Amino acid sequence: MVQESWVPSRRLLKLWSLALDEVAAACGLLLITDGRGRALLRLDHGRDENGDGERCLRVARRATEDGHPILLTKPPAEHFLREGGRVGFHETGSVLCLPLSASGRNIGALCLSRVPQAAPFTSEDLGFLQSLAGPIAASLGPGLRGDDHAAGREEHAEDPCRKIVGRSEAVARIRELIRKIGDSAGAVFISGESGTGKELVARAVHESGSRRAAPFVAVNCSAIPDSLLESELFGHARGAFTGAVREKPGLIEEADTGTFFLDEVGDLSPLLQAKLLRVLQDKEVRRVGENRVRRVGVRFISATNRVLEEDVRCGRFREDLFYRLRLIPIPIPPLRERTEDLLPLVNHYLETYCREMKRERAFFSTEALDMLLSYGWPGNVRELQNEIQRCLIFMDGGSSLIPAECLSERIKPLRGAEPRSHGYFEERAKFEKTFLSRALALCDFNRTRTAEEIGLSRQGLYKLLIKHKIETNPTAVSAAEQA
């Protein structure tokens, strides 16, 4: 079946036929979209007696949205694709889906499925499809490839928020706030756990306003000893202390007309807190060993991974300085609270590091991706970055698929652990079976008495016993337990 807004070229049809023949799929779907969910081109193959076509369409749309290949060889009861019933596999046939991209954006997917009796798809099958992805995209023509979106991509490249990756509401709010405050001179306060990307947000704030051409100067307060930090921040005069052989402007002066980013501001000593407060109030700095003051026009952005309100209550941080710094607060939630950002981040860093390593674009296997999405990421985005770099180093150089074996041990689920069940009906069935087995044992396996005790009719109890295959002969139960 062919459904399209564009007529497929002869070359595209040949590539489609080659994919079906070489991979030996019972059912297949080639989907090209306009980026907003509307199908521009759809090619179907095979009979659809078991709903394979609809299943392939759901998987293809998910792969198009996420930009990641899908290789399923068994029903994904625990798999992320099962969430919300978005896929709903019922058979044990395998499914293979490869997203298609062109001109830097996802344009569709190629999805194939096999019946339960056939051998499941392999990573070699996925590799073959990947070899066809480029020729398929090239055969679509400029309109379908998205070449006409070049101007839009150039405009997107100018967006200072482009590096803040994610599709959660929290990330959308941060981007919106950054665009609103770009030209403001008000102090910005960024809070969040270590590794959430506070400096990335600070740079986006700087680049989104009129100060973008001016300096962006960053300093980590916890990385410099207090004895040196004052000189680093405010500068010093010649001879101000031993080793001061020449005068030196401070980092705040160097950021004049631009942005000064003070990371881990909660680690400032009380003395430096007082001096920083004076700079914020008077817009003046005084170098160590000098009497004269110098005017500075600096926008301050500060950040911390501590709960600074608690430090204020305990007297460890000045309340007046806290409110001066916190004129525009930007909280960044930890990665575990915005799991919908995980997959875009995985794809972003895979593309980034593959480009840096000058290697072909790599993908995580379905099993590995499932483990990544199930992990809690206590180290947030920084931990995710490090894990992806590590996997690219240790993966097989001859393959583009990263297997679960490449993941760190902390990310893999414990062996022998009971698998999680996300389904209401699965949990209800477990409860019913356990409850009925215990009730029978308490009533000496007398079914009539058991029905009376738990408030069921005899017929209702019999149906549940048959449904859950519960043995009501105590001798047989004992023999089964001994076995």
Image (cartoon, rainbow, N blue to C red):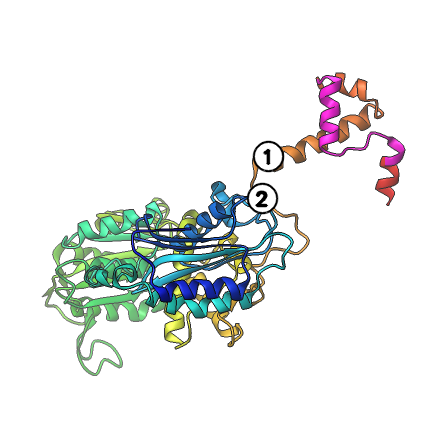
Which of the 4 image quadrants contains residue 258?
Answer: bottom left
Residue 114 appears at what percent x and percent y? 57, 55
Which of the 4 image quadrants contains residue 424?
Answer: top right
Amino acid, disc 1 = Phe
- Helix, strand or loop at label 2? It is loop
Tell me the tag on residue 90.
2
Residue for point 34% across, 55% down:
304
Residue 453 appears at what percent x and percent y? 75, 18
- 85 or 382: nearer the eye? 85
Q: Quadrant of the C terminus?
A: top right
Assess whether residue 347 is covered by the magenta stretch.
no
- 81 or 134: nearer the eye? 134
Residue 354 appears at what percent x and percent y? 40, 72
Residue 244 appears anywhere in the view: yes
Per the model, the C-alpha gap separating discs 1 and 2 is 14 Å
Amino acid, disc 2 = His
432 displayed left or right of 364: right
Q: Which residues are magenta?
A: 456-476
| Tag 1 and tag 2, C-beta contact below 8 Å | no
Q: Residue furthest bottom?
A: 245
Residue for point 32% across, 48% down:
38
Q: Which residue does the numbered mark 1 point to in the structure image?
A: 425
In the image, residue 221 above or below residue 174: below
Foreground mark, 1 or 2?
Answer: 2
- Helix, strand or loop at label 1? It is helix
Mainly helix, strand or loop, the magenta region? Answer: helix
